[in-house]
Image: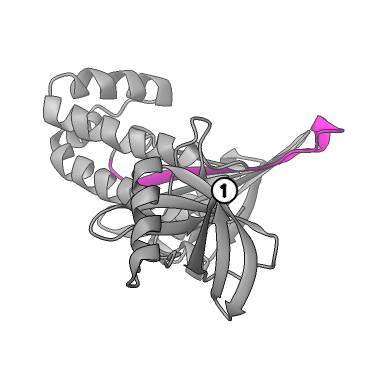
Amino acid sequence: MKISRYGNQGFGGGGSKPSARSAIFRKKFAVGDILQGKILKWYQPKLGLVLIQDLELLANIQSNASLGDILTFHVQQLYPDIILKEINPDHQNSQGAYINPTDTAREFINKRAKFQSKASSIFKKLNDKKINTAENRKQEFFTLLETDVNSAILFFQTLHSAALLNSVLHKTRLYYMPWLVPCALNQEIVLKTRLDKENPDNSFYELLFALDLPPSVPTRFKVMYKKPQCGFKLLADDPRVKTLLENKFKNNFSEYLGTDRIPAHNAGGILAELLVD
C-alpha cells in the first residue's frame, strides 16, 4: 500500500492482505478525513511502514521524516484507489478542515479576476463619483453592488476564499477592499505581524498593498509600524507613477520613506507573502 504526498499514487499491490487492508480502511474512513500516522520502520529511502490507528500500512513518503515521527494525511480518494496526501498539520483550520494555502490563494486570484470583469461598470460609476473618503467609497460600493446580484455573488465568493486562507494563517492576513482605489485592478492587502507577547509595544506590523493602476501599471505600498513610529514606501518601476506620486507624498506625509523598485517576488502581486510563515 502506498500513501502519496502529492496525491498521484494510491493504495496498490495484489494479494489478499492488501485487499483486506483496503477494505478495512474504506470502512473506517471517509474522504476528507484527517489522519495521523507514525513511522515504524524504513525499508528503503521513501518507503516505510506507517501505523495509522491500528492499521500498519506500507507507505511511500516524500518528506524527510525519521522513525517515530508523526505525519498527517488528508484522505483524498477511496475509489477506485485509496489516495492519501501528506499535509502540513498547521494547514487545518479551527474546525479541523484541511485548507491548502497554495490552492486557496489561486482560487482567490481566479474569483477576484471574474469579479473585476463582471463588476467593471460598478467600478467605473464609483470612480466617476470622485468620493474623497474611503469609508464613503465603501458605502457607495455596497450600494452599487446591491443592484448587480451576479457581481455581488462573485464578490462574496472572493471574500470567502480570503477567509479560508486566513483560517490557516497565523502571522498574516489577506484583505480585499476594491473600493479603496476604484480605478485599479488586482488589489490585495497583506498584513504581517510579529507580536511580542511579553512586550506588546515592541510588536512590529508590516502592511503590503498591491494594485495595478490603469492601464496596467504595477504599484505597491509598504507600510511599517512599530509603536510609536510609522512609515511607508512607494514601490514602483514605472517612471510615470513615481513622477505622479513622489512629490505629493513628500509634501504631504512626514511618514513617507521614499521610493524603491518592486522586488521580483512581488511583481505579480504579494500573495506569495502569505506562504512565508
Q: Is residue 9 above or below residue 103?
A: below
Residue assigned mark 1: 89
Quarter of the rendering occupied by the N terminus: bottom left
* Horizontal relation, residue 72 to residue 133: left or right: right
Residue 193 on the magenta segment: yes
Q: Which of the two residues, 172 or 63, is positioned nearer the viewer here?
A: 63
Relative image position of residue 100 (x, y in whole percent): 43, 50
Q: Residue furthest bottom?
A: 44
Q: Residue at x 23, y 59 (%)?
A: 80
Q: Residue at x 47, y 43 (%)?
A: 189
Q: Which of the two residues, 197 or 221, is positioned nearer the viewer here?
A: 197
Q: Is residue 1 above or below residue 271?
A: below
How many numbered badges does the structure rendering display? 1
Q: Which of the two residues, 213 or 19, is positioned nearer the viewer here?
A: 19
Relative image position of residue 158 (x, y in whole percent): 30, 38
Crowding around mark 1 (Cα neighbors within 10 Å: few <14, some 14 to 19, many 20+) is: some
Residue 134 on the magenta segment: no
Q: Is residue 208 above or below residue 131?
A: below
Q: Which residues are magenta?
A: 183-205
Circle 1 SS class = helix
**In the picture, residue 41 is in which quadrant?**
bottom right
Q: Residue at x 26, y 44 (%)?
A: 111
**In the picture, residue 187 is in which quadrant?**
top left
* Horizontal relation, residue 207 to residue 30: left or right: right
Q: Residue at x 32, y 18 (%)?
A: 139
Query: Which amino acid type is marked by label 1?
Result: Pro
